[in-house]
Amino acid sequence: MASIAFVLNGQPVTVEADPETPLLWVLRDTLGLTGTKYSCGEGVCGACSVLLDGARVESCVTPVGDVAGLTVVTIEGLSENGDHPLQRAWIEESVPQCGYCQPGQLIAAAALLAEHPQPTDAQIDDAMNGVICRCGTYHRIRRAIHRAADEMGGAS
């Protein structure tokens, strides 16, 4: 066990954990943030995506020891009350069906818009390729990202 300090959703936290424990389990089981989902456990589906110093990573394969001193943003950290432009666009475009991949989708979209405030369809497709949506709402995801980019000041 080790004391691991990092910034989580804007707040400093310290956890006692084995440094090899996947970040996902620390977020969910130790810190009670259950928005980040477990799915494949192998870093391929993207449902567990979080931002680590602004870059999207799969928390199921990221050891908590690797986040020491860094900044982690989960789906809960996008906004306190669900009013982030991406979250609003997701609702307006009726993106969620089963909803399981949505935290990962929103985190991936946030990382994309931070890097490309005016993303092209190709940039959206490339960025979102790492998060599997079994319901197949990719066309609505693309529309929602363009809508959020417009609201956030980018022009799509």
Image: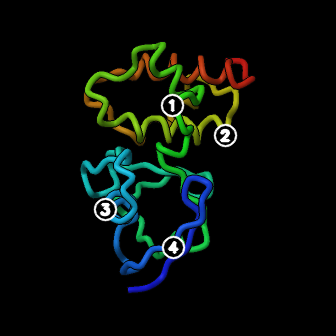
Q: Which amino acid type is shown beneath numbered disc 1?
A: Gly
Per the image, label 4 sits on a secondary structure element best described as strand
**What's the residue at 34%, 73% (across, down)?**
21
Three-letter amino acid code of the residue under disc 4: Thr
Asked if 16 appears above or below 77 in the picture, the reply is below
Instruction: Please report whichever mark, 1 or 3, sits nearer to the chain's N-terminal start.
Output: 3
Q: State the quadrant of the C terminus.
A: top right
Callout 4 touching callout 2 (CB < 8 Å): no
Mark 1 and mark 2: Cα distance apart in space: 18 Å
Q: CA distance from mark 4 to mark 1?
A: 26 Å
The residue that mark 1 highlights is 82
Judging from the image, what secondary structure is the residue with disc 1 in? loop
Helix, strand or loop under label 2: helix
**Disc number for residue 28:** none
Judge left or right: residue 120 versus residue 99. right
Nearer the observer: mark 4 or 2; the answer is 4
- Could you give the CA–CA distance between mark 4 and mark 2, rounded to whole angstroms? 27 Å
Residue 57 visible in the current orientation? yes
Q: Secondary structure at mark 3?
A: helix
- Residue assigned mark 3: 29
- The total number of labels drawn is 4
